[in-house]
Image (cartoon, helix red, strand yellow):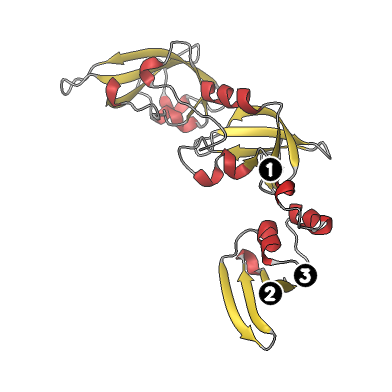
Amino acid sequence: QSSLKIEFDSVASWKQGKQFYVTNDRISLIFENSDKYSPDQIRLAGTRLTYKGYVTGSVLDNRAVVTLKFTDGVNEYRYCTNKEIQELSPNFQVPFMVDEDMVKSVAHQIVGKTLYVRTRLWYDVHTQQMIDRRQYIAVKVDSVLPGDDALPLKVVFTTLDTHEQAMLRISSGKSLQSRDFDAMFSLKNPRNEFPEISPENWLLITKGKVAEGMNKMECRMAKGSPKQIVRTPSHDGMGEYWYYDGGMFLHFEDGILKQFR
């Protein structure tokens, strides 16, 4: 059960005037040809299209295939779904579009709230580049914006301690569970779940760093799960090597970190 409620309304219940954010100029490829515009001249990425209802009909057979109509205020664009209205599931999405009602619904649930980020890999708000920061720290949600096809939601937040603004991209939960809300954010302070971790080690964990003497749980929280684990008996007991991408490894003796690179 996700802590975020994301609902999609079915095409049959879409009202004229519903807004969609366009994620990619390739959207011109899905629209029917028109003598009003040339598909290779349309640049719609970053703009909003307004839903104008649908028409049904098919030349080839008797199916009442749905064609959706959108406008940018200048041109009307038509997208043939090749499906009848009852075949369009609530999860139906037009390619290269993000439903603005869904974005508003998520914003309504989390803007202004204090959440805890579960990942160090954030995005710079201005450059959109990935940045390596901190995890398991408190942030306040500033806004929710439309993202791209794969990750349609951008959550903009400010850290409570240093007032740095950044954002995370999350999926709408239908795909990419690894990037959904609960994978990226926690409603509860994770620090309270691990009172046994020392303040020094907790600070390292938030920065994704490790130190000799840490146990395996602390290292996993700091670095994530290893790609490979190799166990080797040694004269002191059981040794264990954790290997990560990029040549990094952690070496444990009897569950305690002895060496790392």
Q: CA distance from mark 1 to mark 2?
A: 28 Å
Residue drawn at x 61%, y 70% as measured from the top left: 243
Percent position (x, y) of residue 113? 70, 29
Q: Earlier in the sequence, mark 3 or mark 2?
A: 3
Q: CA distance from mark 3 to mark 1?
A: 26 Å
The extreme left residue here reads 61
Percent position (x, y) of residue 117? 68, 43
- Residue picked out by circle 1: 117
Residue drawn at x 76%, y 57% as measured from the top left: 196
Amino acid under disc 2: Phe
Relative height, residue 96 to residue 73 (above, below)? below
- SS label for mark 3: loop
Amino acid under disc 3: Gly
Q: Quadrant of residue 219?
A: bottom right
Percent position (x, y) of residue 116? 70, 41
Q: Earlier in the sequence, mark 3 or mark 1?
A: 1
Q: Nearer the viewer, residue 253 or 23?
A: 253
Residue 130 visible at all:
no
Q: Residues within 10 Å of mark 1 (few under 14, many from 20)?
A: many
Q: Nearer the viewer, residue 124 or 107?
A: 107
In the image, is 34 to the left or to the right of 245? left
Amino acid under disc 1: Val
- Residue picked out by circle 2: 252
- Residue picked out by circle 3: 213
- SS label for mark 2: strand
Q: Looking at the image, do the residues carrying marks 1 and 2 touch, with CB atoms under 8 Å apart?
A: no
In the image, is 202 to the left or to the right of 253? right
Relative height, residue 77 to residue 147 (above, below)? above
